[in-house]
Image (cartoon, rainbow, N blue to C red):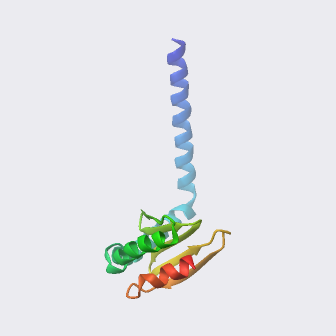
Amino acid sequence: MLIIKKDMDFLDNLENSLKNLESREERDSGAIQRQQDERNRAAQAAPWAEKLRNSDYTRKLFDEASITGHRLRAKVYMAWLGDVLRLEAKGRWCELRPTPSGIEAEFILPDGRSQKESLDLTGAPGELLQHWLA
C-alpha cells in the first residue's frame, strides 16, 4: 500500500509540474513569436538546405575531404545535424548552414574563435578545405 501511495504522489507531482510548465509557456507570448520566427526562417532556408544536401558540390566535398584527411594523416568526420553539414578534423570544425539568403560556412578554430563566410555551391570544394584546414 505504501508503494502505491508513493507512486500516486509522484504522478500527482509530475502532473502538477507539467501543468505549471504549460501555463508558463502560454503566458510567455515571446516564446510563441520566437517559435513562429524560427519556423519561418526554416521554411525560407529549406530550398538551400535541399541544394546543399543534393548538390554535386557536397559529393565532391566528401570525396576531397577524405583525400585531404588521408594526406594530412587525420580523420575527417562528416555528419549531418539536421540541415547542417559538420566537418571535423584536428580540433577544427566547419559547419555549412542553409540560411534564407544562401549557404553559410562557419569555421571554428581550436582556440574557440569562429569565422563566417558565404559559400558558393558552384565553386570548388578544395578551396573550402584549404581555407578550413590551412
Residue for point 57% across, 66% down? 90
Residue at image coords 52%, 48%: 22
- Work out whether residue 100 or residue 8 is closer to the camera in this orientation and state it: 100
- For the residue pair 48 and 125, the one nearer the viewer reads as 125
Asked if 122 appears above or below 129 in the picture, the reply is below
Quadrant containing the C terminus is: bottom right
Of the pair 21 and 81, the residue shown nearer to us: 81
Left or right, 14 with reference to 85: right
Is residue 23 visible from the viewing direction of this image? yes
**At x 39% / y 84%, what residue is drawn?**
121
41 with respect to 63 (left or right): right
Indicate left or right for 87 with 53 as reference: right
Residue 87 appears at what percent x and percent y? 48, 68
Residue 55 position, x and y percent, is 32, 78
* Extreme-right residue of the structure: 111
Q: Looking at the image, which residue is at 41% across and 88% down?
A: 123
Can you give x and y, in whole percent of width and height, for residue 60 in the image?
36, 78
Residue 101 appearing in the image: no
Q: Give the quarter of the image for residue 49.
A: bottom left
Number of callouts? 0
